[in-house]
Amino acid sequence: MTFEKLLQQSLVWRGLYFVTLLLVNIVLSRSLQADGTGWIYYLTNFFSFILLVASLSMESGYTYYASGNVISHHKLAWFSLWWTLIISIISAVGVGIYFKNLKSTELSYTDNYIFYAATYIAGILLINFFMVLFYAQRNYVVPNLILSIVNIILIVVILLANKKSNAYNIVVNNYFLSILLQGILLAIAFIVINKSYLYISLPDKASFKLLLKYSLVALASNVIFFFVYRIDYWFVRYNTATCTPTDLGNYIQASKLGQMALIVPQIFASVIFPQTASGTLRENITNAILIFFRVFLQAMFIGLIVIGSIGYWLFPAVFGESFNNMTMPVLLLLPGIFSLAILCLLSAYFAGKGKVKINVYGGVFALIVVVIGDIIFIPKWGINAAAAVSTVGYTVNLLYSLYHFFKDHQFSLRVLYSFNKADWYWVKNMLFHKTTNL
């Protein structure tokens, strides 16, 4: 299957999933408003960090060795279930201890947090593991269809729950349960489709060492990137003098929109990594990265104009009246989102070539910028400062990665801004034609 055909399939089916994810975000925001939505996303951010560290970023090793068919997919599937069970139990116990003993939270609330942590962490782990295995087999239809169907069901549940007196509890509980359901259904689908139930076994000691070695290196990178992308949530949350709970909700929603804008580069990156790791289509991928750089740069300028013109009434109309402070953070984040879009591609490219350290060092430089900037500016200028500082940090990271990308290929800087219609024709052909030439 050609690179363009792989990308077409990924765009269509992952695009479907992300559309349903956006709809979930909208109905959840309108149901819980800015302060409630901000709390949910802040809590999942906390759980995501626990998941990342406790799981040792094992899904990164999966991506590398599953894409190269170094370790049997059947063994990886069964290891996923075992690893998820262990990490979920450990994480849930840790969350319980944290809220009960360290935060002195009431028992009823602690039980809720344990439930949220267990469902979220188990669900996300299963989703991450089995999405990797499906994508390694170039199967984009089944996993994204499953995720989309569950999202649609969740949307219906939220809309119906809004008519009830205990709507808040119903919405929050079903939000976390839906994540676990998605993970379980993905696991079942993979095991059934591949008949992995006939090959119940785990990776041997040598294979496990390979997984662990790669994952631990990737863990350093992922922890750094986690803080680069999300440490501003904590600074906004605890700078109560300039940031209210509603401000937190507005800022996280602006950040979420930025993440939605990364859909296309993330989809592209999910195709880049397996093909780079397996050593195929590398020349096509290199040229495609340059084309997307120019296209995304032009798209960023268009986005700035559109959001600057209609953002002040668009966001409250879509998400609810409490989201009336999103426009400026979104505008300030857009150049940073452009940097992240290109970093998605470059990070996948370097990781596929086994050069994870480039991603790590770039993330370190960005994190230093973000932490220092947030400490200095958020107490004075609130969420607008958080957005601006993040953009500067992301740009520093991009410049570092571009430096190493250009060292590999000896391109002229002009290729980054030599805009031409051929780029857009290539994108059009890639999306709608059977074959394209780079």
Image: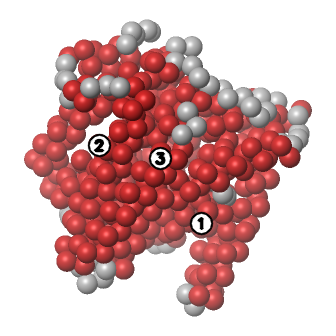
Q: Nearer the viewer, mark 2 or mark 3?
A: 3
The scheme the figure's colours follow is secondary structure
Nearest the viewer among 338 and 115 is: 338
Instruction: Say whether residue 28 is visible.
Output: no
Nearest the viewer among 247 and 414 is: 414
Q: Secondary structure at mark 1?
A: helix
Q: How many angstroms separate mark 2 from mark 3 (CA)?
A: 17 Å
Identify residue for label 1. 50
Q: Amino acid at mark 3?
A: Asn
Mark earlier in primary sequence (1, 2): 1
Where is residue 194 drawn, in percent x and y? 77, 29
Q: How many marks?
A: 3
Q: Is residue 4 left or right of residue 252?
A: right
Q: Is residue 114 left or right of residue 198?
A: left
Most extreme residue toward the left, as rendered?
Answer: 309
Q: Amino acid at mark 1?
A: Ile
Circle 2 crowding by C-alpha within 10 Å: few under 14, some 14–19, many from 20: many
Say if mark 1 contacts mark 2, CB within 8 Å.
no
Identify residue for label 2. 338
Q: How many angstroms separate mark 1 from mark 2 (CA)?
A: 28 Å
Identify residue for label 3. 359
Instruction: Say whether residue 303 is visible.
Output: yes
Circle 1 crowding by C-alpha within 10 Å: few under 14, some 14–19, many from 20: some
Query: In which image quadrant can residue 76 be found?
Result: top right
Q: Is residue 374 left or right of residue 186?
A: left
Q: Amino acid at mark 2?
A: Phe
Nearest the viewer among 1 and 309 is: 1
Q: Residue at x 61, y 81 (%)?
A: 98
Q: Secondary structure at mark 3?
A: helix
Circle 3 crowding by C-alpha within 10 Å: few under 14, some 14–19, many from 20: many
